[in-house]
Image: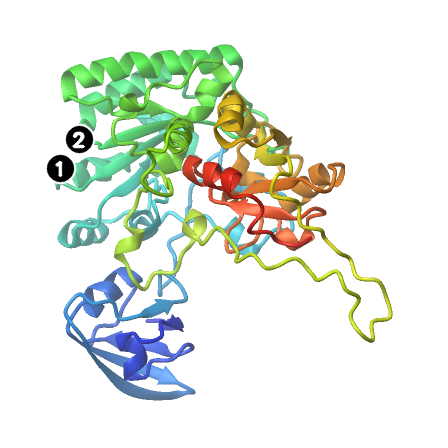
Amino acid sequence: MPPARVLAVAPGSPAAHAGLEAGDEILSVNGEDLRDVIRYQIQADEPVVELELRRGGLEQLLVVEKAAGEPLGAELESAVFDRVRTCDNHCPFCFIYQLPKGMRKSLYMKDDDYRLSFLYGNFTTLTRFTEADLERVVTEGLGPLYVSIHATDPEVRTQLLRNRRGATSLRWLAALLDAGIEVHGQVVVCPGVNDGDVLDDTMLGLLDRFPKLASVGVVPLGVSSHSREDSMRPHTVEEAQRVVEIIEAWQLRFRSILGHRLVYAADEYYLMAGRPFPPAAEYESFAQHENGIGMARTFTTEVRAALDGNADGPGTGPRSGFFSWVEGAPAEGYRAPRTIEPVAPPAPDLPAGSDGPVRVTLRPSRTAPVVIITGTYGQQVLAPLLDELTKGTGTQIRLLPVANAFFGGNIGVTGLLTASDVSAALASQPEGRRYLLPDVVLSNGVFLDGGTVDDLPRPVEIVPTDGVSLVAALRAGSKRLVPA
């Protein structure tokens, strides 16, 4: 079994006191050869933790004594120590197939691993799920899980996954639900394939076969300009309206029969259809918030609460998955740290001995006009709030919507903006403004195209992507800048 490599050790933690070091390879914990960070967490919760290590090629035993359940204080390099279970489907709508060349290698990996579903909220199709996996999930209570359904008709699901096991793998979903595991589903709607009557039939299939599902999110197909699938195309306005109508009709049926709405349409559908977002109460627990469902309503609610002085703290929105439960797991995907630590702008003085000029970025004044950088969908959410934000913060505000030329197609969500597109938009903007950049565009301080805020032609303030933080940033003035 491949070892788990220690990435960092928290100062003052039980692991640090026992002598664990970054770079150590953990071969076993309490005598168990571990496959993933889930088993690591279970063993590390014990009051006495025996770590069989390899350091500098030499093996040794390290014993850590602590309170039961106390964090060990070690961060591991990866969440899965054996091989990640990759996806063997060939979905024509898969966004990984639509990525341009030359990006980080990790972005091209397709996983279909139930463990990453549990840890990070990744969606799995269950086409590689096994009886042994079911036994482990049930025995260890690994929920919630997140399952890509797409269609309940076996032939349509096979067509969508381009995998003959697509016709039968939903039997595992039924088994998980029967065993009491919390599962959230997803349907990616492809125009002309699983929309319209097929989507209506899928809703009926959910009620008939999977009524124990905790929630189901219905999201639109994203088509980048790099897609090679001629059959995959964006929705028309009429198709988007039809999807919303189907979902809202079934919400009433589910609520009448099951006691809750079960299914929810993505925010993008309401934007495409030109319809207002549902009230917050209709999203119930916001179970699919991380899937882009209810984000706009949450954001608007947070902004108004903050303006009224009723916000308790930074609004992070509901979060799915059990990432916080597993102390040793590294942040991955959308759970990676979003922001980078801002640094002070460079001093305006020419350094002694310098043989060239220094590029200087002047700090915008506290009362400088504010420009909020956002995607094209984000513009539609923010624009109706500008008057309220201006009056409530006393700040002159405008939006800078950035078209996504990097991916192209119908990609308009803010989280997929890249450094190249943001740079192109900022290049023509005046200096002396406060440019606010939502942290959702960054993962570990890096844009999807590998650029950083240092590559941008204007200084920007990194602001958490929630309404409370935005209001706080507007009221606080230019305190946290990153130099160009």
Q: What residue type is labelled 2?
A: Lys
Q: How crowded is mark 2: few (under 14 residues within 10 Å), some or many (20 or more)?
A: some
Q: In which quarter of the image is the N terminus?
A: bottom left
The image shows residue 473 at horizontal and vertical percentages of 50, 42
Camera sees residue 429? yes
In front of the other: 415 or 400: 400
Disc 2 designates what residue? 212
In front of the other: 28 or 386: 386
Q: How many marks?
A: 2
Residue at 34% x, 40% y: name it.
125
In front of the other: 168 or 139: 139
Residue at 71% x, 62% y: name it.
347
Residue at 35% x, 38% y: name it.
317
The kind of secondary structure element at disc 2 is loop
Q: Which amino acid does label 1 sit on?
A: Asp
Residue 178 got which mark?
Answer: 1
In front of the other: 197 or 260: 260
The image shows residue 412 at horizontal and vertical percentages of 56, 30
Q: Do the residues labelled 1 and 2 touch (CB within 8 Å)?
A: yes
For the residues carrying marks 1 and 2, which lies nearer the camera in this image?
2
In the picture provided, is 132 more to the left or to the right than 26?
left
In the picture provided, is 340 more to the left or to the right than 129?
right
The image shows residue 281 at horizontal and vertical percentages of 27, 23
Q: Residues within 10 Å of mark 1 (few under 14, many from 20)?
A: few
Q: From the viewer's perspective, is residue 149 above or below residue 99?
A: above
Along the polypeptide, which appears first: circle 1 or circle 2? 1
The kind of secondary structure element at disc 1 is helix
